[in-house]
Amino acid sequence: MYISELNENKLTDAQLETLLFSGVEDDNQNGDCIVVAGSSMAVRYRLPKAIELYKQGRAGKILFSGGVKWGEKTVPEAIELKNEAVTLGIPEENILTEDLSRHTLENVLASLLVLDRAFHLYNIERLLIVTASYHMKRLYLTMKTYMPDWIAFSLCPADDLLTGKNNWFQTEHGRKRAFAEAAKIIRYVKQGALVDERIGE
């Protein structure tokens, strides 16, 4: 079944789980850069995954993406992530930032310019993507749609302890978040904003 064949208003739990979580596993390949999508809780959940990948030698650079200032915070997501990464021992020269984006599509589009300036896009073969597991499919499809087709992606989901494959259905908040995410993907695919893709068997 293709994503475009799903009905966002009649999704079964099984369809939702397949859409959001199937194929969202790390292939353990190395890449040119680790790309981290910002969020209100990115420092807590996504940053540790990025640092783990960096220290494993999976990539020599980390790009933090996100321009939203959450709540009382005085700096955007990307800068908060960078500052915390530096305090945790990541050399500043190996950190890239884009602090303009306001949502997932802008994360990708704004990151393209930063990546081109740092590497030249034609030199990039693989990116390691870090975001929450429930958000990974949309971010991956957005990168697949808008980034050059020679770039491959390794999906490195960060567990947010609430909306993962094994627990999204256990709380009302998790269910609402998962269904809202699935609905966005289906809607964007049907609009032509995201590439369509076969899911499941």
Image: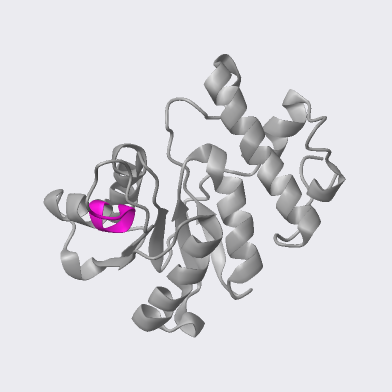
- Total marks drawn? 0
Residue 72: image quadrant is top left
Question: Relative to 28, is 74 on the left or the right?
Answer: left
Which quadrant is home to the C terminus?
Answer: top right
Q: At 43% from the left edge and 26% from the top edge, which residue is drawn?
A: 161
Residue 148: image quadrant is bottom right
Between 123 and 133, the one lying in front of the other is 133
Q: At 12% from the left edge and 50% from the top edge, which residue is drawn?
A: 87
Q: Is residue 156 visible?
A: yes
Residue extent of the magenta highlight: 75-80
Q: At 61% from the left edge and 69% from the top edge, which residue is drawn?
A: 146
Q: At 78% from the left edge and 26% from the top edge, which residue is drawn?
A: 12
- Picture layout, residue 67 above or below residue 45: below
Q: Is residue 78 magenta?
A: yes
Residue 33 position in % (x across, y down): 39, 65
Q: Is residue 166 visible?
A: no
- Picture layout, residue 37 above or below residue 7: below
Residue 170 position in % (x across, y down): 56, 15
Residue found farthest to the front: 72
Task: Name the dominant secondary structure of the magenta segment.
Answer: helix
Which quadrant is home to the N terminus?
Answer: top right
Residue 122 position in % (x across, y down): 50, 84
Q: How is the image coloured?
A: one colour
Residue 57 position in % (x across, y down): 31, 58
Q: Is residue 105 magenta?
A: no
Between 106 and 2, the one lying in front of the other is 106
